[in-house]
Structure formats: C-alpha cells, structure tokens
Amino acid sequence: MRLMLAAVALCTLAVPTAAHAYCRTTTQQLPPNYSPSRGCFTQGLFLFWRNACVSYSINQAGSRNIPYEEAKRVIDDAFGTWMRAECADGNPPGIAVSNIGAATCGEVRYNGDSPNQNVIVFRDDGWPYSDPNSTLGLTTVTFNADTGEIYDADMEINSSARNLSTSDQVPANGFDLASVITHEAGHFFGLAHATDARSTMFASYKPGTAALRTLAPDDVAGLCAIYPDPSIRVVSSAVSANQTIVADACDPNPRHGFTAECSTPKREEKCAATPRPTASWAASGSVGLAIAGVFVARRRRARRPR
C-alpha cells in the first residue's frame, strides 16, 4: 500500500535571464496559482531521462469514442513530431522514443523493484481529479529527487464529456487529440509550460484548432537543451558542476523491465500508521493542458511506501 503525500510548496519564484520561452520541469512544487506568464519556475533540480531511448505503451482499451488503432496512430505521430525536430546543429534531439506495445494496465503507478510501463490511458468514465480548471490531460512523472532523473511517466487523457477529435478538420467545439498528446509528450520529456502563447507547451488550448500539433522553435529549443546529444544530458549545477552527465546506452525498456500488466512489487509493503521512507524518489503530476484562457498550475505529489 502506498501513501500519497502533498509536497510542501515553495513560495519563491525565479525567472531565468536567458531569452527563451521554454521552461523545464523541476523537482520542486509550484506555488499556488502559478502562471507561466510570470516566467519559468527554476527552484529545485531539472528533470531528464538519462537513457538514450525511452518508450511508452498505450492502454489496449483505447477509448469508447476512439478505437485503439486510431488512438495509436495519433499518439505515435504526436511523439514522432518531437523526434522529427531538428536542433540548432542540424541533428535530431539526443533522445529516441518508441511505442513498446499495448498495455493492459491502466493505472498511474511506478514499481521501484519490479517491471513497469510508461502508460497512456483514456479516462472515459470521469476525470479522477477534482480540478476546477477543465484539464484535458495529465502526465505524472516519477523521478529521483536527488538528481532529477526521470524513472517513469504516465499520461492520462480526459475523454469524459470531451469532444476529442482525430480528424484533420477539428470541429469548432472539438478538442484535437493530436494537439493534446503533442503537448503532453513535452511533459513526458521533462518540459514545463512555456511562457510564449505560440508554443505547443503553452498552458492552454483553444477548441477547434490544431495549432499545437506543430512545434514552435522554442519547443524544439527546449527539447534540444535537455538532450543535445544521445550521449549527453544537461542537468542542474547541483548535480554536475559542468551541468552535463553521460547518458546511459539506448534501452527502451522501462526501469526494471517492461510488463504490459500492472506488476505487483516484489517487496511486501504493509500498512502502518506512519510513512516509512524507503527510496529517494517522488512523483510529479503535471496538469498538461487546459481550455484557452485558463492557466493551470502543476500538481505535485510525493509518494512513499508505508
């Protein structure tokens, strides 16, 4: 059994001096009612995948309104949009991503001692978060709290009472699934909400449009800033004095291996009155996208076995 604890919020904002609009997700919680218009939040450590290649799985149930194969087509193309980007040196980003296969598991979870999956799941039967801001997607990223290394990322798509569209022409009241996934994929890679309204990683989306399918130069610059080369990861200075570390060799399998099912941890976890920390990792839920005009603060959760 796991205990979900709300992380303590910081009340200090820091705005970087660099002239760019992309922002990186960090290990620290955002202050309440934070708006990207105030600049990037840089407290804590920057998040990153250390592996040269990562993977995702789509829940095999798809959605009642979007069959699995159609969802797969849109999701694969959305991730491909990031992979087809070109960095300033003319090379692709230094990270690869692939669809490793369908998953039967539809839970947002990370197993610290058994196989995992970075799952993408549709929520048809109600959005399980009491968020007043009409969110369209949520990506929960589990990371090492001491380094910022991402261990796992699970994406939930709000398909309850949402007119999700997979067509080239998005209905006036429709929500373009490709736009939602492309935005959430940015969170998957470690990007936070951008400060420029023209960016795919901006915090809101206008119904009836497909503009977020296309990356802005700043979105590409953000991905390349984290992954400039397959052998290098750009990290916080607290992790490495020169702000770089060597990437791990390409292995698309999730941490501890891949399973399509909801794996049971090997270590028995018993209930107790007081949480017993056993590992230095936490989960960061990033509210990925909201209807236009609504700025959404990211939710942060820390999980520890008990």
Image (cartoon, rainbow, N blue to C red):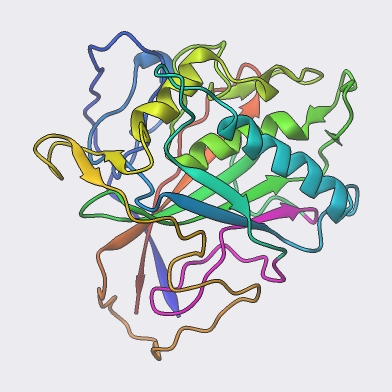
Is residue 104 found inside the magenta-colored segment of the image?
Answer: yes
Task: Say whether residue 222 is left or right of residue 145.
Answer: right
Picture quarter with the N terminus: bottom left
In the displayed structure, would residue 172 be above or below residue 244? above
Q: Residue at x 64, y 30 (%)?
A: 81
Q: Residue at x 36, y 35 (%)?
A: 229
Front residue (pair 175, 147): 147
**Residue 39 location (% of width, % of height):** 34, 17
Specify whether residue 75 is in view: yes
**Residue 70 location (% of width, % of height):** 86, 46
Front residue (pair 217, 170): 217
In the displayed structure, would residue 156 be above or below residue 212? below
Specify whether residue 33 is in view: no
Q: Residue at x 67, y 70 (%)?
A: 105
Q: Which residues are magenta?
A: 103-125
Is residue 33 found inside the magenta-colored segment of the image?
Answer: no
Task: Say whether residue 299 is left or right of residue 130.
Answer: left
Q: Quadrant of residue 231?
A: top left
Task: Say whether residue 149 is left or right of residue 217.
Answer: left
In the displayed structure, would residue 96 be above or below residue 19? below
**Residue 21 location (% of width, % of height):** 41, 14
**Residue 287 location (% of width, % of height):** 53, 39
Front residue (pair 304, 147): 147
